Image (cartoon, grey):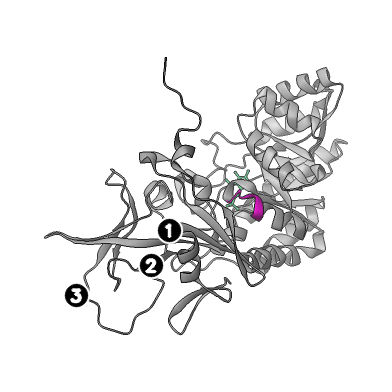
Amino acid sequence: MHSFTYRQQHLHCEDIPVRTAAERFGTPLYLYSAETLRDHYRKLHAAFRDFDPLICYSVKANSNLAILNLLVREGAGLDIVSGGELFRAKKAGCPAEKIVYASVGKTEEEIRDALEYRIHMFNVESIPELRRINEIAGEAGKRAPAALRFNPDIQPDTHAYITTGKKETKFGMDIETVRHTLLNQGEFPHVDFRGIHVHIGSQITDALPFQRTLQKVLELTEHVQSKGIALSALNIGGGLGIVYENEQPQTADDFAQAVAPVLRKINLPLILEPGRFIAGNAGILLTKVLYVKDTPAKRFLVVDAGMNDMLRPSLYRAYHEILPVEQKKSEPCQPPRPADVVGPICESGDFLGKNRTLTVNEGDLMAVFGAGAYGFSMSSNYNSRRRPAEALVHEGKISLIRKRESEDDLIRHEQMVP
Ligand SMILES: Cc1ncc(COP(=O)(O)O)c(C=O)c1O
């Protein structure tokens, strides 16, 4: 479900015509729906209600403070992967005991700060990291709460760059290492071992890889518990897929039903870390057609948003639906011809969509759907482009939640040598 619908041929976000947002804040513009964000959070929470889950929204998906705060107010915790995300979590008012911290490369400073803030748990990705956490906790006279990230060697059907549970990837630890560490936890006296973390990848539309992963987790937990090791947490990560094109992803209920039997057997307090499922379809990227460029080989719709604003098509060849904000009845000025929707960046990889048949003209607005997750959060200033503004429709009003960057922002941290 999402709240971007056409009414009398005008695209609306909830009850607000999307054109209004573009007129107020300019383009390119990310526009989000609070109703959709809440709905997705609530659906997932309801689906797992028998497990009383802690849902730690994955900050990396969309880290705007307004969005974090909205979800925190719903009761969400946050899944973070850097000191910067910890800073955002604090600013968004997230209680420390609802923050979990993954990342294969936590620095000493990041570990110290997270420990100081008393986060709920580190998701530890390697033995060297565990040693470092143990040392830092010892120096601080504390015990560091930790789950071990288990790499189950499972291949979900998704893009290679967002597969994280295969043994060849840099994430987590193999079953033997996790088992051995839990059984010999006395070697890390300043770590409070709480449980297991798994996250096998992103945009996974089918329950089977999750079921297979959890079956392996069950073997692991049963084994260590039979040796007297107490566990108090199972974090099953994120990864739930959404509709970008014609995928048929499992619903929150389907997912919960598919994994409930094995979760009951594991029988540990449950944490989830969804990002895309909550934010993906809660946002669009609004962009204006600058030029309709016809060449003998191809038509290009040159728009004012580029790969710096929205990287997913270029990086993963990800498909995003692109539609005109106004569905016109009148004849198009241009005869229809499939076109590549491209940005102004100096790279042939700078496209938002390929071979789309769209009846639009110069000056028209278009919406790139499914832009709420890994959209703005992966944006950059490449080609010295100012990052776009972000706005949120919330209780019948649109609010600017991030100003468009200024030219001064571009050079704020630079200086010339004397
Ligand atoms: C450890 C961890 N948890 C959760 C997520 C969120 O994944 P998704 O947005 O697919 O739910 C990610 C994404 O990369 C992740 O690395």
Name the one closer to the observer, 153 or 403: 403
Q: Are marks 1 and 2 in contact (CB under 8 Å)?
A: yes
Label 1 SS: loop
- Quarter of the picture containing the N terminus is bottom right
**Marks 1/2: CA–CA distance:** 9 Å
Q: Is residue 117 magenta?
A: no
Q: Amino acid at mark 3?
A: Pro
Asked if 2 appears above or below 239 in the picture, the reply is below
Q: Position of residue 183 (x, y in %)?
A: 80, 30
Label 2 SS: strand
Looking at the image, is mark 1 or mark 2 earlier in the sequence?
1
Q: Position of residue 239 (x, y in %)?
A: 59, 53
Q: Residues within 10 Å of mark 3 (few under 14, many from 20)?
A: few
Residue occupying image coordinates x 69% and y 50%: 236
Read off the residue under disc 1. 27
Read off the residue under disc 2. 365
Q: Position of residue 312 (x, y in %)?
A: 43, 51
How would you classify the magenta stretch by its main secondary structure? Answer: loop
Label 3 SS: loop
Q: Amino acid at mark 1?
A: Thr
Name the one closer to the observer, 165 or 161: 161
Q: Is residue 82 visible?
A: no
Q: Residues within 10 Å of mark 1 (few under 14, many from 20)?
A: many
> Is 199 displayed left or right of 301 in the figure?
right
Q: Position of residue 337 (x, y in %)?
A: 21, 70
Q: What segment carries the magenta color?
A: 62-66
Read off the residue under disc 3. 335
